[in-house]
Amino acid sequence: MERVLFDQVVETDYGQFDLTWAGDGFDGDFDRFFAGQTNGLVGASDPNGLYVNLARRSGGSPVRIVVLEAKPRDDADAPWKDVVEVSFVLPEGHQMRWSSWAGESGGVLADIPPGSYRLRASAKGRDRGREGEFSDHSVDSYLLQMWPAPPQPDAVLRTGSKDAKYWHREVGHRR
């Protein structure tokens, strides 16, 4: 069973989308957010939240966030070309929030119990997103699925875009 927490077009700058429970989110310190990771798309090393790197620097990108009861099945035929997984812990007494660059927009993601989670971030259209910064319509989209799970190292499950390869090479591999 899936519970939808968020499903809308996010207007952002610099491709920044944060999920936080303490602090202000990504501040440009890739070393802090990606320390010990191999992927370059979702920074999960900061204990105060996650940084999701959207391909489109400016403009709107559809983002859907869902909570699942268990790990989703791997679907190689799905339209998602770039897929990574990270672990995070939502501490007791904290509420998860989402925000775009510099807190320009944001809100609460309600009713997520504290605990250890795995997050799968799936993307399609990253290359079009990078090239279509000034497009009048959405060109890239994202699905963020989270479920209760013990912590484990991040993983790159699929890389199909030049943009994701770039970020994995430049920001990932900080182990």
Image (tube, rainbow, N blue to C red):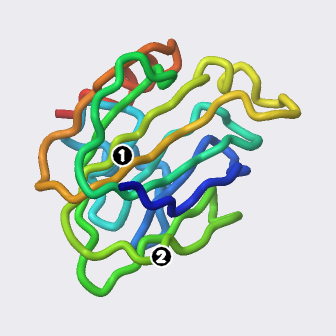
Dot in front, 2 or 1: 2
Q: Secondary structure at mark 1?
A: strand
Q: Nearer the viewer, residue 2 or 47?
A: 2
Task: Work out which residue is located at the far front of the displayed protein and give it.
Answer: 1
3D distance between C-alphas at marks 2 and 1: 22 Å
Quadrant of the rendering where the C terminus is positioned: top left
| Residue highlighted by disc 1 | 43
Q: Residue furthest right?
A: 136
What is the quadrant of residue 157 in the picture?
top left
Residue 58 position within the rendered picture, expressed as x and y whole percent measured from the top left: 73, 40
Residue 159 in percent (x, y) is at 39, 17
- Residue at image position (49%, 42%) is 143
Instruction: Name the image quarter holding the N terminus.
Output: bottom left
Q: Is residue 172 left or right of residue 28?
A: left
Q: Nearer the viewer, residue 2 or 62?
A: 2
Query: Residue shown at 61%/18% (left/top)?
Result: 127
Q: Residue at x 49, y 70 (%)?
A: 109
Q: Which mark is residue 110?
A: 2
